[in-house]
Image (cartoon, rainbow, N blue to C red):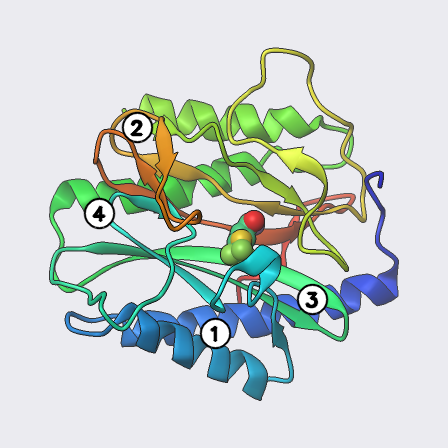
């Protein structure tokens, strides 16, 4: 299916989905502490999503078994919550979640420090988040898609980190993953599609402290860095407008 322009009615539903998801992330951020299991994080997230009248979009998505992806330290994305996995002081943890509100989706991720973390881990989290904001400065009608990609990559690499190549952002709407793919690096060819008001995109830099190479673990989900260095993730669902982009999943 081609890239779609959302109607005002669709945008209103995505705005609500985004608002609810932003709230869920704020609340999840408050329970991140040494000792909590990643399973407890998933339970709380699912409970709050359903309480708000939404469906957790990740649950059973292509067989993924939970509502919140919880990825610790060298885990890049798609970590599977477990009663056996607990957070420790000094860890960094990425939480990725998606909700469906009346048939429309929102997708967002945040990375948190657990207790006191060292300065380099904090810098990794901050650079990852800021790379998203550098990217969306280019997310204006008339620009090209890879202008966003290039801006993210430039900011990350200037700060001495690397951008994961094997996973990308995406269009989003009534489906979690729609066209186009949104890389966080500039592809060799082309400038990407022209951005139009009414397009909705999930922009999600995944940034490694070391090299960009990743593996997938035996569980077929958990993506980890090959060199064992830490990784951070930051994502929001955004709307392209005639002016500034609107960030739907940040309150
Ligand atoms: N947030 C992820 C993405 O952007 C989706 C997680 S895959 C799932 O594409 F299986 F966990 F749902
Ligand atoms: Co996504």
Residue at the disc numbered 4:
122
Residue at the disc numbered 3:
15
Above or below: residue 224 compared with residue 6: above
Q: Nearer the viewer, residue 178 or 236?
A: 178
Who's the residue at 29% across and 56% down the image?
Answer: 93
Who's the residue at 49% across and 36% down the image?
Answer: 134
Above or below: residue 11 compared with residue 170: below
- Could you tell me residue 102's position as x and y percent? 76, 75
Counting residues from the N terminus, which is met first, the one under dot 4 or under dot 2? Answer: 4
Q: Which mark is residue 161?
A: 2
Counting residues from the N terminus, which is met first, the one under dot 1 or under dot 4? Answer: 1
Query: Distance between the Cα atoms at labels 2 and 3?
Result: 32 Å
Visible residue check, residue 126: no
Residue at the disc numbered 1:
24
What residue occupies the far front of the structure in this picture?
218
Who's the residue at 65% across and 11% down the image?
Answer: 189
Badge 4 element: helix
Badge 1 element: helix
Query: Distance between the Cα atoms at labels 4 and 2?
Result: 13 Å
Counting residues from the N terminus, which is met first, the one under dot 2 or under dot 1? Answer: 1
Badge 3 element: helix
Q: Which mark is residue 154?
A: none
Visible residue check, residue 105: yes
Query: Distance between the Cα atoms at labels 1 and 4?
Result: 22 Å
Given contact means CB atoms under 8 Å apart, are the residues at marks 4 and 2 in contact? no
Establish whether ligand 2 lies closer than 8 Å to the Cβ of label 2: no
Counting residues from the N terminus, which is met first, the one under dot 2 or under dot 3? Answer: 3
Given contact means CB atoms under 8 Å apart, are the residues at marks 2 and 1 in contact? no
């Amino acid at each position: 299916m081609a890239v779609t322009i959302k109607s005002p009615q669709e945008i209103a539903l995505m705005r609500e989905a985004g608002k609810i998801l932003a709230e869920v992330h704020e609340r999840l951020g408050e329970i991140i502490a040494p000792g909590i299991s990643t399973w407890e994080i998933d339970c709380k997230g699912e409970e709050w999503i359903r309480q708000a009248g939404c469906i957790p979009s990740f649950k059973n998505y292509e067989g993924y078994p939970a509502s919140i992806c919880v990825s610790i330290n060298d885990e890049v994305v798609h970590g599977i919550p477990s009663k056996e996995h607990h957070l420790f002081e000094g860890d960094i943890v990425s939480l990725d979640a998606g909700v469906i509100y009346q048939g429309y989706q929102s997708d967002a991720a945040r990375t948190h420090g657990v207790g006191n973390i060292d300065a380099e881990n904090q810098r990794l989290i901050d650079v990852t988040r800021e790379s998203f904001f550098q990217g969306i400065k280019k997310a204006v009608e008339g620009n090209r898609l890879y202008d966003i990609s290039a801006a993210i990559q430039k900011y990350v690499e200037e700060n001495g980190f690397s951008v994961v190549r094997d996973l990308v952002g995406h269009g989003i709407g009534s489906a979690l993953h729609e066209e186009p793919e949104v890389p966080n690096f500039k592809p060799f060819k082309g400038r990407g599609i022209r951005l139009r008001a009414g397009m909705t995109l999930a922009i999600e830099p995944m940034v490694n402290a070391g090299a960009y190479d990743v593996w997938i673990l035996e569980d077929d989900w958990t993506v980890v860095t090959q060199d064992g260095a830490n990784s951070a993730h930051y994502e929001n669902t955004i709307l392209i407008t005639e002016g500034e982009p609107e960030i739907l999943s940040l309150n």
